[in-house]
Image: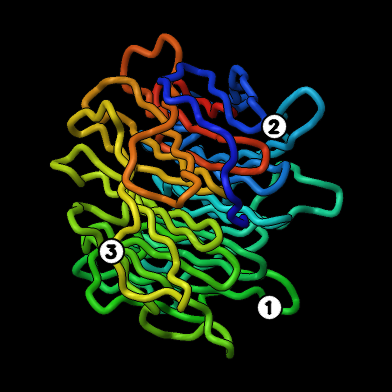
Amino acid sequence: MKAFARRGTFLLLPIVLAFCLPPAALCETPEKLTPSGAPPNESFGYSVAVSGETLVVGAPAISGGVGNAAYVFTRRQGGWVQVAELTQSDAETSDLFGLSVAIDGEAIVVGAREHTGEVYQQGAAYVFVKPATGWTNMTETAELTASDAQPIAYLGNSVAISGRTIVAGAPLATGASEGAAYIFVEPATGWATTSQFTAKLVSLDGGEFGWSVALEDDTLAIGAQQGNSAYVFVKPPSGWSHSTQTAQLTSTSSSLLGSSIAISGNTICVGAIGSNSDFGAAYVYVEPQQGWMNMTQTAELTPSDGVLLEWFGISVSAFDSKIAVGATYAGGAPGAAYVFVQPENGWQNATQNAKLTEAGAAQADGFGQSVFWGSQGLFVGAPSDDVAVYVY
């Protein structure tokens, strides 16, 4: 995901279920994806991730019960088609398998933060590797846990993958909401079930560290929403090792900074659902020329029509010069996804360039719970009432 200079002008109009992205001036009605054979309570769309022409959607059965799954779609002529359902070989009631998902190339990671293995609700991350014959219904290739797991550590609350490296956030790993992020590097023989991690990262001041994670190449960003901070780790030349952060990202005025996090090139975006007296915000940080260092935000992104407790910032995604921010409207109104485009002179405080909502939505359906930019467009999850993912 490399940054590029924006050209053209983005429409400064609220749009319902359609928008235009210059310079291509693409206008379209979104494609609506639903799972085949899934019960409505599976919360399909709670998490989404895309790599090339492959989409993975988490369905963590938030309302409880066995039946958690992740679904794989591939882009074919005429649209997106479901090709596989991913499940656990050791599924338990209320694992929340699918609460988080990540994909890179032919590997998918699915988090199940409340899975109980050797320790009560220690959590786990499941790895699925694409078979030679293509994606198909399957259980995991490997299950990743932590050898030092504590009860209710919630490993898998967040997951990320880049190349041969997987990161799993465990925001309660060390007790007292201090948290950790575990790094697993694929062995030469391929992914295999293990509790032996390559590195364990912690922050200097905790605060549910690991609530959100994002990884791109050698740069790892981790949110700690109760600590109102995000942290940047840069991979050492000798490889990942137990360490504290390279830089701490804060804001001049935020609450629950680290609710969500995303990386694109030299830009990190962090959601803060409690900022601005619970109206929410997303903060943009641009890497200085001399490298990541402790800093406050480069820009603050807010909605022009903010609603109290709308959870603006519950999800964020960055791709090239664009950022999407989800707002699920916790107060009961329909959710939305807000689109921001980087100005030619760089990121600055701004309200949205476009607002995406569901046509006819009359109550909270979770639209915006998940957002993800990819080369194939913007994907927005609506996991509550609608149980769908929209592709723009």
Vertical placement of 247 versus 170: above or below?
Answer: below
Q: Give me the residue at 31% from left, 66% from top.
A: 249
Instruction: Give the x, y percent position of residue 361.
Output: 39, 13
The residue where tag 1 is placed is 187
Q: Amino acid at mark 1?
A: Pro
The residue where tag 3 is placed is 296
For numbered disc 2, what is the local secondary structure? strand
Q: Residues within 10 Å of mark 2 (few under 14, many from 20)?
A: some
Vertical placement of 198 versus 60: above or below?
Answer: below
Residue 133 visible in the current orientation: yes
Farthest residue toward the bottom? 238
Q: Amino acid at mark 2?
A: Gln
Q: Nearer the viewer, residue 34 or 284?
A: 284
Q: Give me the residue at 53% from left, 50% from top.
A: 101
Q: CA distance from mark 1 to mark 2?
A: 30 Å
Horizontal placement of 358 versus 229: left or right? right
Q: Nearer the viewer, residue 226 or 191?
A: 226
